[in-house]
Image (cartoon, rainbow, N blue to C red):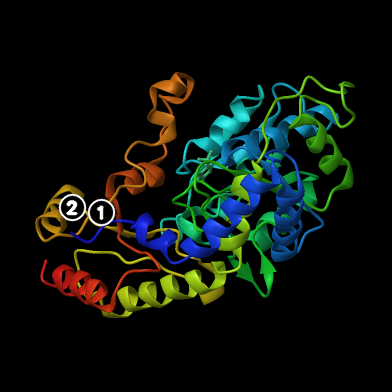
Amino acid sequence: MIKFLDLQSINKKYKQDLMAAFERVIDSGWFIMGEELKNFESNFANYCGVKHAIGVANGLDALVLIIRAYKEMGVFKDGDEILVPANTYIASILAISANNLIPILVEPCLKTFNIDPLLIEKSLTTKTRAILPVHLYGQLAEMEVILRIAKKYNLKVIEDCAQAHGASANGKMAGSFGDASGFSFYPGKNLGALGDGGAITTNDEELASTLRALINYGSTLKYENFFKGVNSRLDEIQAAFLDVKLKHLDEDTALKRSIANRFINEIKNNKIVLPIIKEQESHVWHLFVVRTEDRLALQKYLNFNGIQTVIHYPIPPHKQKAYKELNDLNFVISEKIHKEVLSLPLGPTMTKGDVDLIISIINLY
Ligand SMILES: *Cc1c(COP(=O)(O)O)cnc(C)c1O
């Protein structure tokens, strides 16, 4: 069986360095908010080309806390609206509603799976305060257009970079376009910890210092609380692991990119619609997502032939029970995407044989 994502072999490549990091942290006797975190935050901020990276407990918290911090700063208030793509992973939307703000869903482009920039202006109301683009499956959203609209209407831009570590356009990195960005280090993400983790990147000093307090019970001075904060911190051990893997992120991305390019050039089957990319650097291939009319048949066929696939995602957020208030809305493009998408195996440790097999099996379908 070709696994959808082989995390065992992906982490095995770095096992020696990960073990050394593990030992260093054990021997230090310091497990929360220490040198490992400081070092990783600094390296990750440099990597993204921003002033501040703030480690948090997971990617959802990263997005929730950015919005929360803007509320504490008086930029957002209850009932304000944030535009978000209708086909995103539900976490982007949860981050908005968790703060008592209103998610306004916007249809994606069928070609890129990202928020349709032409529909953004039509979705604005007097209550719109921000756009939350998601670089879905690893491909940058149309940031140039999004930033232009945001500037025109004085909106904040919050990037959901959970799937796009290292994606770039003209040398500018994911996480450096917007006012603030949320990253996830969930084990299966492009930069994955050995457990949960996340980070926020920003160039905004006030936002960064508000966040530093919010993630730590609302306190930056021991036993003095400025906000009703939370506990959302990135452990020393995860920061140490992530720093090992950050050094190899671009290599791993290059390996995935070359496999994705083979899929794009060599898969030839008119029942299958391949993903489209703008520039090589703008896509880091968190997922290789194809569309097909009879998805179940394709998935069964591939499974029968030893190829594991996953659906990202089977149910649109507006049709989830959790969002009853949205259940009556219709998003035709998003619903089509949710019905037709299938993610093929794609990982930096896949062999040439694996890739050959996937291509030939699909071409015979
Ligand atoms: C994974 C993911 C998140 C949430 O990250 P967690 O670390 O799992 O909380 C948010 N948005 C998107 C698009 C994701 O893929």
Q: Nearer the viewer, mark 1 or mark 2?
A: 1
**Label 1 sits on residue:** 309
| Secondary element type, mark 1 | loop
Q: Earlier in the sequence, mark 1 or mark 2?
A: 2
For the N terminus, the image quarter is bottom left
The percent coordinates of residue 307 (x first, y second) are: 19, 59
- Asked if disc 1 and disc 2 are in contact, CB closer than 8 Å, the reply is yes
Residue 322 is situated, as x and y percent measured from the top left of the image, at 44, 22
Determine the CA span between mark 1 and mark 2.
7 Å
Q: How many marks?
A: 2
Vertical position of residue 145 compared to residue 172: above or below: above
Q: Is residue 195 visible?
A: yes
Which disc is residue 55 wearing?
none
Amino acid type, label 2: Gln
Please tell me how crowded label 1 is: few (under 14), some (14-19), or many (20+) other residues with Cα within 10 Å. many
In the figure, residue 168 lies in which quadrant? bottom right
Q: Which residue is at the front of the view, 252 or 296?
A: 252
- Does residue 120 appear anywhere in the picture? no
Give the quadrant of residue 267: bottom left
- What residue lies at 61% left-to-right and 68% top-to-bottom? 247
Q: Secondary structure at mark 2?
A: helix
Residue 334: give x, y in percent of width and height. 40, 44
- On the picture, is 146 further left or further right than 71? left
What residue appears at the point 24 percent right and 56 percent down from the top-left corner? 292
Q: Which residue is mark 2?
A: 299
- CA neighbours of label 2 inside 10 A, class few (<14), some (14 to 19), many (20+): many
| Residue type indicated by callout 1 | Thr
